Amino acid sequence: IHVRIGDVPQCTPSFEYFSSAIEKTSFSQGYISSDTIDAEICKKLIEKYILKVINMDEIDTIMFASTCKYLVLSNGTFSWTIGFFGLYSTVYYPKLKIQWHGDIFVFPEWHEIDY
C-alpha cells in the first residue's frame, strides 16, 4: 500500500478506499509506504491490517513494491510509478475525486476503486 499525503492531504484517498482495495486481495504479509507514515490514516491501516512499514528511499521503495503481488496505490505520479513497475502485480488505484494531475491511471488491467 502506498499512501501519498505530503503537500496534498486534501487529495489523499480515504481510509475506506484503502480498506476496500485491501479487502479485494488475499495477502499473507502486507506492507505500507508513505511520505507521511505518522498520519492517522496510516496508523489505522497499520493497526487494522497488521502492515509492516517500508521506510526506504524512493528507488528502493519502487524496487521493493515491484515484487509485490498486490499494489494499492494513492493519487500522484510516485504511486503511478510504483504501479507501472509492478509488471506482475494486481494494481488498484483510487477514482480521482479531486483532479490535481492528469489522467495517468490509463492501464486497462488496473482496477479503479470508487469510494
Image (spheres, grey):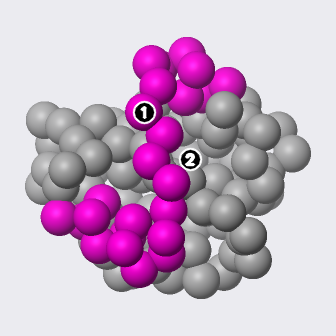
**Image-based side of 29 in relation to 114, left or right:** right
Residue 85 drawn in magenta: no
Residue 110 percent across, percent down from the top left: 70, 57
Which of the labelled discs sits on residue 10, or is there none? none
Precedes in sequence: disc 2 or disc 1: 1
Q: Secondary structure at mark 2?
A: loop
Vertical comparison of 63 with 84: above or below: above
28 or 1: nearer the viewer:
28
Residue 46 found in image quarter: bottom left
Q: Mark 2 or 1, which is nearer the eye?
A: 1
Point 58% across, 20% down: residue = 60
Residue 41 found in image quarter: bottom left
**Image-based side of 96 in relation to 81, left or right:** left
Amino acid identity at mark 2: Phe
Can you see residue 97?
no
- Tell me if mark 2 has few (under 14), some (14-19) or many (20+) residues whose alpha carbon lies within 10 angstroms of its own: many
Can you see residue 42?
yes
Vertical comparison of 52 with 14: above or below: above
Point 41% across, 80% down: residue = 48
**Image-based side of 72 in relation to 28, left or right:** left
Q: Which residues are magenta?
A: 40-63
Tell me the residue that label 2 is attached to. 105
Amino acid identity at mark 1: Asn
Residue 19 percent across, percent down from the top left: 45, 78
Point 79% across, 55% down: residue = 69
How far is mark 2 from mark 1, CA to CA? 25 Å
Residue 53 drawn in magenta: yes
Tell me the residue that label 1 is attached to. 55
